């Protein structure tokens, strides 16, 4: 583009939004806006996307290869990696080495890693963190369709008359799709049903929320299939001509009467009937599902139970209808395409199919080809711990935080004889265990492609120079392959050459019996690659321009006989059920403004303004029974370990259930890695862990003192039982608590920020109430403020943070700072709801009340406060506040 703008793709979720970026002169920041021409988002962005420009600074980056923590050059590092992998293979065989890769990689990176491991090393020991988020969807697709094919596209959300959201908090996890759905609902009256154990932000637009008991989705959808049959909604022609196994599946579905389903799902029969009738009576229905379905020991059955209902009614592959898996990572789909999973081959060929293995090996001209599935993620790290994996290469992911039983994963990493990590950040929980650290190019520094949840391939383009010696992941892998003796097959000079090879492989001996075909681009050159516009696959060489928007409308599937398969889905309980000792069900997930383990989003201070601490959301009845008050610290534990997190008491979760976000690592909190509590139970078919269901206990953390601090510099990590810190506007913020004897306030201040030892200190002390407050000044400038109390600190944190680095005046102006609240002319804004514009909850509630019975809409609040007028990610919460405010007359 002109004027310094670059078209690229957002590096966060699987929506795959197009963004326009114009970097600052020094490359340490950028202007970011949505690309109005990109068909995934049409200019919309979420809070994370709009804050991308604040994540680009070089501070904290890994800038040179490190061997044993010592900087070295690329030649020495790559020679060592190649030698260690070659020695392990020579002594112990190909299965003694492994790669663990990531949906953060570009398709070209993924392709090169897969080619090296499966085609040249000869092992399938390459798996991906996408195993944790969508492997059950892959398995369900393959069982039903014969291929991992997503039938529909985003447009279907706007064409459907009914959207069923299952285990998907679309408003927070895929905000741009939520905005498209909300706009369609307002424009054409689309009905929305949300099936989720929690009343999430997405429920703000729901006509019906089914607060299902975790793990009972199969029973609910089996019951739906039986209801469709009883009410003559089955498409008999489609079922008889294009499917198999319907009668046996229907027999299983008919085993559960409605009352039994209601008991299993903890729902009323009335609500279940309302859902069943809506589905039966609406032809254009799309069922969107995500991690609440996939992350389960019965995840694949859940997927197939949903697909069964769409196959039975013929509601698949047509405008506004079909099952739709939305993925969590920017290139989870691209990884699936090129065989990034341990049980797949590249270009949607099957590892278990001898003919497919022949095609791929012949195309690659490889000396060998893996002929059996490799180790899936959980089993891979178990093999590392058992000493079976002698060399492991981890790329662009943080399994020491994100894997289930993460303490055991850390033990495995520590015991691994040779561990290589390709990473952008110098300090991550996983990087701490590396023998070799390789600096990777980050978003905005590398070129390649990604595929979003609707099979749309988009370009990621570089707009800044990678700092230090950082290099693309594909280059690192190819250089190691060359040193291992495979130079001819890994001699690419640019990503376009890799993409062209991948496109050619997808068309190799493909007469239409494989869904993925990009052969139109097999001869693509640099100029065309540079200007490549987003497109959906397939893109066959001799087909008309443009990919197919939808699959299966013609009733043709990719099974041997071309018919879809109905899959029996018997009802089974989750693996880790509550007991008297562990009475609560733990659910893990995401929050609106953070991403994965926060290695990128924590660089953008405004993203911490919405939620700045790890927390547990629990029902008021459970909190009262356990003596836990709002804002108390709690210990959540089982026999695997424990975490300390802040209590949020809310009826958004059901009694007996708790919700904890998965983002916090040891970089940002003392004990908040929730996956330490999650057992590594997996789906038998997909190998995906059950991250959404575990048994825990919870108790109040009885601290003797609490503290909140804010400063322009990062605090030193303090040896308190609880601490949580995050960047903030103009500096940093930290929360602390401990059961130990309260420290002297001045000593605590100096230990957190020893660089302020010569600063002017203003203090307030109340020994009786055990309240102590301090402010450090450099002349007129506020450097830091620290509040210590015997109970959770009450102050307007955002107000205190806003004063950092600002002139503090004198006299009363300085004393007011120690109050921790704005003066009378500056009311308390409350917790931040709109991170983009810094609008607080109290401001929004005041604006709602100010409508005085008039119709109140989200747009009205936007006019009055600005909230929701930028990225729109907070609009669901604003609507929820409108509905919850008695004075409001919501429209």
Image (tube, rainbow, N blue to C red):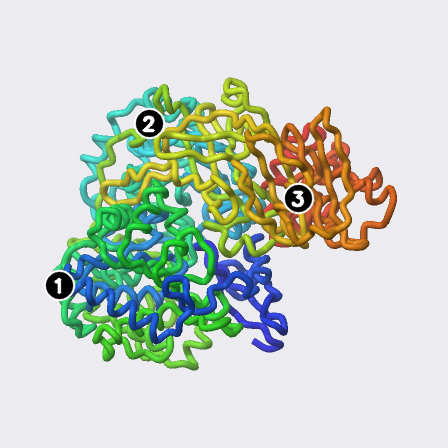
In the image, which is nearer the foreground, mark 2 or mark 3? 3
Q: Above or below — where is 189 with respect to 25?
A: above
Q: Nearer the viewer, residue 646 or 407?
A: 407
Mark 1 to mark 2: distance in Å?
43 Å
Is 720 displayed left or right of 424 in the figure?
right
Question: Could you say which disc has been placed on residue 355 in the image?
Answer: 1
Query: For this rendering, which residue is in front, 542 or 683?
Result: 683
Mark 1 or 2, nearer chain start: 1
Q: Nearer the viewer, residue 41 or 684?
A: 684
The label number, if any, that marks residue 507 in the structure image: none
Residue 52, percent across and down? 56, 60
Q: Bin the neighbour count of mark 2 within 10 Å (Cα to Cα): few under 14, some 14-19, many 20 and up.
A: some
Measuring from the top left, give residue 290's x and y in whole percent.
40, 44
Q: Quadrant of residue 682?
A: top left
Residue drawn at x 33%, y 37% as measured from the top left: 679
Residue receiving disc 2: 577
Tell me if label 1 and label 2 are in contact, CB under 8 Å. Answer: no
In the rendered image, which residue does mark 3 sit on? 749
* Residue at 15% over, 55% down: 372
Q: Is label 3 or label 1 in front?
A: 3
Percent x, y for residue 624? 54, 19
Left or right of residue 858: residue 37: left
Name the quadrant of the C terminus: top right
833 relative to 487, above or below = above
């Amino acid at each position: 583009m002109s004027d310094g703008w670059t078209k690229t793709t957002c590096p966060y979720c699987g929506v795959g939004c197009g963004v326009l970026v114009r970097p600052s002169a020094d490359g340490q920041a950028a202007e970011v806006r949505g690309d109005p021409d990109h068909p995934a988002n049409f200019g919309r962005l979420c809070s994370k996307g709009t804050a991308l420009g604040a994540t680009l600074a070089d501070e904290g980056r890994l800038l040179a290869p490190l061997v044993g923590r010592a900087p070295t050059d690329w030649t020495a590092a790559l020679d060592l990696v190649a030698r260690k992998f070659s020695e392990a293979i020579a002594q112990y065989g190909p299965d003694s080495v492994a790669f663990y890769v990531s949906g953060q990689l570009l398709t070209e990176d993924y392709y090169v890693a897969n080619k090296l491991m499966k085609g040249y090393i000869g092992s399938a020991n390459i798996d991906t963190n996408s195993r944790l988020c969508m492997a059950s969807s892959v398995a369900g697709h393959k069982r039903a369709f014969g291929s991992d094919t997503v039938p529909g596209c985003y447009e279907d959300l706007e064409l459907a008359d009914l959207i069923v959201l299952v285990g998907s908090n679309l408003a927070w996890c895929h905000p741009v799709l939520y905005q498209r759905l909300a706009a369609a609902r307002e424009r054409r009256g689309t009905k929305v049903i949300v099936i989720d154990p929690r009343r999430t932000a997405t429920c703000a637009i729901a006509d019906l929320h089914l607060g299902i008991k975790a793990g009972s989705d199969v029973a609910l959808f089996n019951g739906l299939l039986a209801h469709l049959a009883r009410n003559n909604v089955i498409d008999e022609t489609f079922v008889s001509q294009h499917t198999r196994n319907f009668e046996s599946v229907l027999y299983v579905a008919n085993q559960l009467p409605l009352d039994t389903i209601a008991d299993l799902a903890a729902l009323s029969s009335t609500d279940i009937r309302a859902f069943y009738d809506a589905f039966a009576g609406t032809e254009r229905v799309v069922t969107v599902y995500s991690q609440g379905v996939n992350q389960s020991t019965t995840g694949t059955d859940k997927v197939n139970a949903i697909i069964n209902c769409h196959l039975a009614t013929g509601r698949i592959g047509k405008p506004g209808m079909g099952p739709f898996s939305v993925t969590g990572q920017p290139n989870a789909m691209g990884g699936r395409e090129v065989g990034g999973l341990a049980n797949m081959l590249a270009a949607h060929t099957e590892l278990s199919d001898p003919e497919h293995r022949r095609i791929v090996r012949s195309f690659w001209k490889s000396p060998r080809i893996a002929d059996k599935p490799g180790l899936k993620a959980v089993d891979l790290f178990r093999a590392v711990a058992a000493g079976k994996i002698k060399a492991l290469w981890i790329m662009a992911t943080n399994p020491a935080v994100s894997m289930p039983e993460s303490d055991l994963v850390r033990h495995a990493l520590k015991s691994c004889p040779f561990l290589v990590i390709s990473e952008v950040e110098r300090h991550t929980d996983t990087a701490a265990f590396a023998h070799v650290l390789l600096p990777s190019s980050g978003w905005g520094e590398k070129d390649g492609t990604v595929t979003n949840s609707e099979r749309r391939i988009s370009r990621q383009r570089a707009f800044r120079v990678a700092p230090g010696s950082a290099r693309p992941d594909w280059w690192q892998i190819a250089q190691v392959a060359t040193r291992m003796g495979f130079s001819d097959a890994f001699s690419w000079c640019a990503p376009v050459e890799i993409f062209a090879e991948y496109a050619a492989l997808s068309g190799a001996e493909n007469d239409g019996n494989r869904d993925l075909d990009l052969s139109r681009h097999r001869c693509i050159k640099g100029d065309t690659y540079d200007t490549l516009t987003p497109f959906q696959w397939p893109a066959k060489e001799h087909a008309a321009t443009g990919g197919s928007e939808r699959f299966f409308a013609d009733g043709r599937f990719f099974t041997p006989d071309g018919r879809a398969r109905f899959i029996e889905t018997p009802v089974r309980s989750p693996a880790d059920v509550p007991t008297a000792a562990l009475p609560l069900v733990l659910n893990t997930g995401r929050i609106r403004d953070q991403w994965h383990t926060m290695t990128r989003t924590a660089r953008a201070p405004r993203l911490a303004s919405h939620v700045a601490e790890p927390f547990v959301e629990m029902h008021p009845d459970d909190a009262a029974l356990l003596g836990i008050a709002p804002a108390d610290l709690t210990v959540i534990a089982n026999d695997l370990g424990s975490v300390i997190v802040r209590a949020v008491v809310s009826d958004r979760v059901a009694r007996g259930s708790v919700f904890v976000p998965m983002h916090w690592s040891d970089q940002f909190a003392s004990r908040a890695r929730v996956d330490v509590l999650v057992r590594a139970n997996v789906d038998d078919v997909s190998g995906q862990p059950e991250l959404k269901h575990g048994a825990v206990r919870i108790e109040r953390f009885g601290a003797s003192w609490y503290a909140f601090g804010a400063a322009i510099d990062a605090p030193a990590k303090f040896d308190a039982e609880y601490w949580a810190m995050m960047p903030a506007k103009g500096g940093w913020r930290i929360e602390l608590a401990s059961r130990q004897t309260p420290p002297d306030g001045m000593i605590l201040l100096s230990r957190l920020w020893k660089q302020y030892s010569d600063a002017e200190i203003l203090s307030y002390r109340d020994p009786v109430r055990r309240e102590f407050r301090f402010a450090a000044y450099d002349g007129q400038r506020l450097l830091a403020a620290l509040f210590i109390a015997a109970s959770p600190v009450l102050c307007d944190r955002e107000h205190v943070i806003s004063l950092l680095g600002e002139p503090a005046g004198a006299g009363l102006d300085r004393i007011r700072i120690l109050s921790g609240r704005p003066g009378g002319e500056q009311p308390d804004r409350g917790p931040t709801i709109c991170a983009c514009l810094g609008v607080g909850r109290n401001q929004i509630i005041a604006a709602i009340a100010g409508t005085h019975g008039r119709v109140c809409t989200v747009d009205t609040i936007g006019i009055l406060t600005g909230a929701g007028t930028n990225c729109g990610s907070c609009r669901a919460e604003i609507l929820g506040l409108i509905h919850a405010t008695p004075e409001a007359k919501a429209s």
